[in-house]
Image (tube, rainbow, N blue to C red):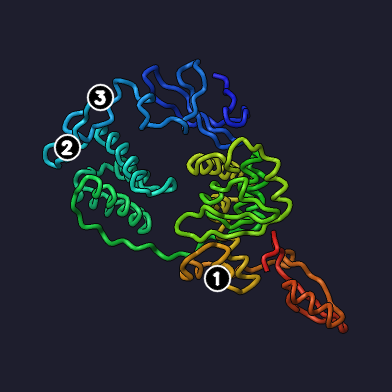
Amino acid sequence: MAAPQCPQCGSDRLYRDGVRETRGGAVQRWLCRSCCFRFSLKEPGGPLRKTQSWHFNTSSNIPEDRQVCAILQEAKNLDTTTVQKETVSETSKDFDAKTAKGLLLQYALYLQKEGYGLECRYKGCIRMLINSGANLLDPESVKEVIAKKSWKDGTKMQVCYAYDALTKMLKLSWNMPKYRQEEAFPFIPEERELDDLIAGAGSQRMSVYLQTLKETMADPSEALRLRWIDINGNVIMINRPVKGHYPRPVEVSHSLISTLNQLPRASENIFPTTYVNIARCYFKIRQRLAKKLNNPRLLSISLVTFRHWGATMVYFRTNKILLVKKLLGHKNINSTMKYTQLIDFKDSDYDVTSATTVEEAKKLGEAGFEKCDEFNGIHLYRKPKRFVSLA
């Protein structure tokens, strides 16, 4: 079957992204390499259907024979006039695939109602438990599965918080295990490796998105929330932060603003896609470039690594941890201290200049240069090369 065109940007550069089972048979899912939009065909040979725009809680989008209330004592259709809520009983109901599917749907609606936010990944954590064979209606079974998994303690802690929200929805009692986030230094790549990923992104939108991560040091989800009205000159306002970060302005290069303005303005957001879609597309690009450039270090560079690299470089240049905290939007200084590790620079990574008078030396000091040597009365200064002035 020939690849269709993306309904978002019109590109025909698509990835095959699995299949979706429907009443009319299996249909192909597609992921756009240009804008990271994910969509599928409504039926074999039928018109395009945007996956993101299909809402489970809209009655017109739910077939008459679709059963979504599997957490009840009996599965019931939505065409009935009334649906009575019943308390889940651990002893009277077996946990099977149909039960899990209905429970996930109800859990997603519960998270939305409780205001957990679109970036909340609790639903993915619950899906991990289901795939691991845990009985979500039995807290002891969940604790046993979590304990046996080889996940990191940070992942186990996140899964416990996700299941804790589920127990509140189902009114189950359980004692949450005590896992703690392990401390580890983030992987800091070379700037050349980040530039290789940006240049080899394969599409203008993905390339600009990665460059935005590099220059703003924003969380990947924060960058996806950027709107056109957040750009003012060469300053980008991060007005919709995530993870409890502070809103903040960030100065970027004029070249980034120029490339941003070349993107189509078909939406309020600069990057009209979801984190799941853009992450899936980025992982494929990263794997392809790691093999092409014979550099396995690229596989360790995640979307949040651009943020880690920027924070470490700013601290190396300025030695001001409070400046790093402000640029990252952290509320707790302890979250910023991990970026105080230093990077060994090569000679080619420095801008070098000289001064012969006191006035020249003062100007170089104000620009962030440090004296490194002296030769025949000429003072030599240098500073690390930067993508944007942040002194």
SS assignment at label 1: helix
In terms of sequence position, does the residue under pointer 3 or pointer 1 come before the other? Answer: 3
Seen in the picture, residue 137 relative to 366 is either above or below; the reply is above
Q: Nearer the viewer, residue 160 or 52?
A: 52
- Name the residue at 60% across, 43% down: 270
Badge 2 density bin: few <14, some 14–19, many ≥20, Cα 10 Å = few
Seen in the picture, residue 109 relative to 47 is either above or below; the reply is below
Q: Residue 340 carries which label?
A: 1
Residue 92, position as x, y percentages in the image: 11, 37
**Residue 300 appears in view:** no
Q: What residue type is labelled 2?
A: Glu
Q: Name the residue under label 3.
A: 77
Image quadrant occupied by the C terminus: bottom right
Q: Nearer the viewer, mark 1 or mark 2?
A: 2
**Residue 10 appears in view:** yes
- Name the residue at 35% across, 26% down: 59
In terms of sequence position, does the residue under pointer 1 or pointer 2 come before the other? Answer: 2
- Whole-Å distance between the Cαs marked 3 and 1? 57 Å
Q: What residue type is labelled 3?
A: Asn
Q: Name the residue under label 2.
A: 86
Q: Which of 288 and 20 is in front in this view?
A: 20
Q: Which of 293 and 154 is in front in this view?
A: 154
Seen in the picture, residue 196 relative to 183 is either above or below; the reply is above
Q: Is residue 335 left or right of residue 88?
A: right
- Whole-Å distance between the Cαs marked 3 and 2? 15 Å
Residue 188, position as x, y percentages in the image: 57, 61
Residue 385, position as x, y percentages in the image: 72, 64
Badge 1 density bin: few <14, some 14–19, many ≥20, Cα 10 Å = some
Q: Which amino acid does label 1 sit on?
A: Thr
